[in-house]
Structures are given as structure tokens and as C-alpha cells.
Amino acid sequence: MKETKLYLVLQTNSSILSLCPNIKNLDISYNYIWKINSLGQLPHLTTLNISHNLFDNVPDVVTNFDSLTELDLSHNQLTTIRKKIHNWIDTQHTKFGTFKLYLSNNPLICSCGTTTFLRWILTTKVKLNANGNYSCWVSSTKKINYTRNVADDFHNYFVDCDTAVWIKLGISLLVSVLSSLICITILYNLRWRIIFFFFRNIRRFAEKGLELTFDYDVYVSYSDDYISFVKELQKKVEDEWGFKICFEDRNFNVGESIATERATSIHRCRHVIFLVSPSIFENEWTRFEIEKAKYEMFFKNLQNIVVITRDTPLDDIIIEFFTIWKDVFLIQWPVEKDEVQMAWQKLRLWFF
């Protein structure tokens, strides 16, 4: 079917050759074909000549011919052969013990992008016409040369290829390192929020399993000389951290027994904070709150007891909490601004 203007037929009926399924040798050269979608099922085809056409890539349709052992691609517009195609050709050679390939008079390119094809020409066991020595355009020298010459002096012709690879690798590593640093920086800056988020959800899950319910996160015990600090604590804990505080001046029900309100409130809280000042132990209700906290801690209804002290001897505090001192978290409230910030962070961590 040489010089039959077959390209006109293939435009309307791409599987016309399926009417002749026993074809072994097919010559469709000189037909100005630049694309083939299908030639039909030709299971016995062994020789295919598609030379003197306009193919700029080896058509994938050739890989459908399982019996093919000879392929003529000469006098086309091929610049290289894709890895998929020459792997299939090697498979055919292994399968039948022979394969002939014709590539003469194609505008092959010898460049960094075609080095795989050039190496394949040197190593393949497929029988190539012209002994596998084809003219090619060498991009590095801007001249025509032969594939054998280029392959023999491969490193000189393509010394820049490795440089490009290393540059790409270096850029990739740099981007990866920078991305990692950015992620680490973000995670470091948000580490407390992330930790608190997971701890809060884990804690709520555990409480649900133990059927524990709390109306407040923390109960605050204090004397009158700590009212200003209570307001500061309320702003930090409720407004910034999102926890709920229970304290006498706001949450106690008017008209109810003071003892009942204090005991019930401590029972409904996860944690208790004692703001210890020199006058706190003069408060008649402080010891009651301490004993109630000890009771709740003993029965594991209370998670943490935090003692925050200012200008109060440590011995006085230890005496009051002696029986559960190992379970008490102590913060001696600092004066320096930087140390105060660390104290807030420590307190927030203990809330979990």
C-alpha cells in the first residue's frame, strides 16, 4: 500500500486493515501519514514499513502488534525514540530472538534530553541499520555529528547535563529545607496551642469514659488582698485561654449555705487554685476549702491542686497541704516580666 494516499482513508476509517487480519508484511510508506490511531487487529504482522512519512514520534499503535519483528522508521521526522518504545522493542527481541529497526534519515537530536536513547543505541541487542550510527544534531556544539561519535565522547558532549541535574537537585533540597524550617517554625510558635488542643480533647474523651462531668475548669480560693490578681487571672484564663472559672464573688448562689456552695463548687471543678497570701490562713473558709480539695483529690474527682504564693513562707504552705503535698503544684509568683510570662505558661500547662 505504498504511495496510495492512505492518510485520506485513515482519517475516516482507522481500522480498515482489520478486513485483512492475516497480513504478515505491511508497507504503508510514502503516504504522508503523521498520525495513526489504529490499523485494526493484525495478530500475524511481522514486518511493518512506515518509512517516508511525517511521524515525529513512534506511534503507540506499533506496540499492539505482538508478532512484529521488523520495523522501518527511516525518512520520518523523529528526533528520538521514547523509552516506552525501545523497551517494547527489547521485549520483542527477547521474545523472538530477533528484531530489526531502521532509523536512517531522521532529524535525530543528541542532547541532555535524549541521552537515554543514545545509551540504548550502544547497548541494545536489536539489529539496527547503518550499524546504529545515525546523523544527529548536537545541541551543545550546534553542529551535525554521528551518534557513535557522540556516544564515544559522551561526557564531554554532555558535561552540562550533570550540572543541570545537580542544580535541580540542589534547588529541590533547598526548597525542602526551607519548607521544613518554615513548618518547624510554625509548629514551634504554635506548639502550646497544638499541645493544649490534643490534651483538651483527650481529657474530655477520658472524662466521658469515666462518666465525669464538670461545670467549671478551675475553682479559685483567695482572700481579699488578692482580688486584683483574681481579676487578672480571670482575664487570662477565661478571655485568652477559654477556660471557665468559679469564684465566690461571681458564681455562688445568694441565700444558699456558704459551706454547701464552696463544697459543691469544688466538686464541680476540674482543678483548684489557692492564691496564698499572708492573710489567707486567717480566712475561716480557707481550711474548709483545703480539706474539701484533699477529699476530692483522694477520691480522684479533682485533677490538680495549684498553689500560687506571694510573700508567704513555704513552711506554712507545706503544713496545710502536708498529706497531699506530692500532688500539689506550686508557683512562687515572680516579679520580673519575663519570669511572669513563664509562670503563666506553666499554669496553663498544668490546667491539662
Image (cartoon, helix red, strand yellow):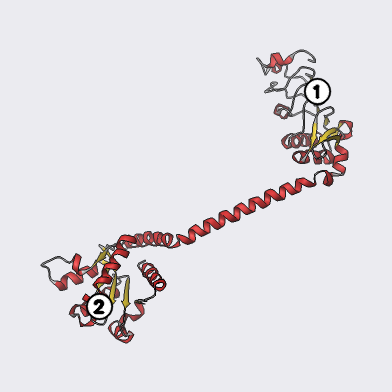
Query: Picture coordinates of residue 295 (x, y %)?
Result: 25, 76
Q: Is residue 347 left or right of residue 6?
A: left
Mark 2, residue position: 290
Residue holding disc 1: 51
Q: Earlier in the sequence, mark 1 or mark 2?
A: 1
In the depicted view, which residue is nearer to us: 342 or 80? 342
Tell whether 238 sits left or right of 15: left
Q: Position of residue 294 (x, y in %)?
A: 27, 77
Residue 316 seen: yes
Q: Residue at x 77, y 28 (%)?
A: 68
Judge whether residue 223 can be spotted in this image.
Answer: no
Task: Answer with the quarter of the image where residue 42 lies.
Answer: top right
Q: Position of residue 48 (x, y in %)?
A: 79, 24
- Determine whether the residue tagged by mark 2 lies in a helix, strand or loop: helix
The disc label shown at residue 325, or none: none
Residue that lies at the very extreme toward the left in this rendered image: 255
Figure check: 1 above or below 219: above
Report the residue at 70% width, 50% height from top. Answer: 167
How many numbered dots are placed on residues in this image? 2
Kindly identify the amino acid type of the residue bearing the numbered disc 2: Ile
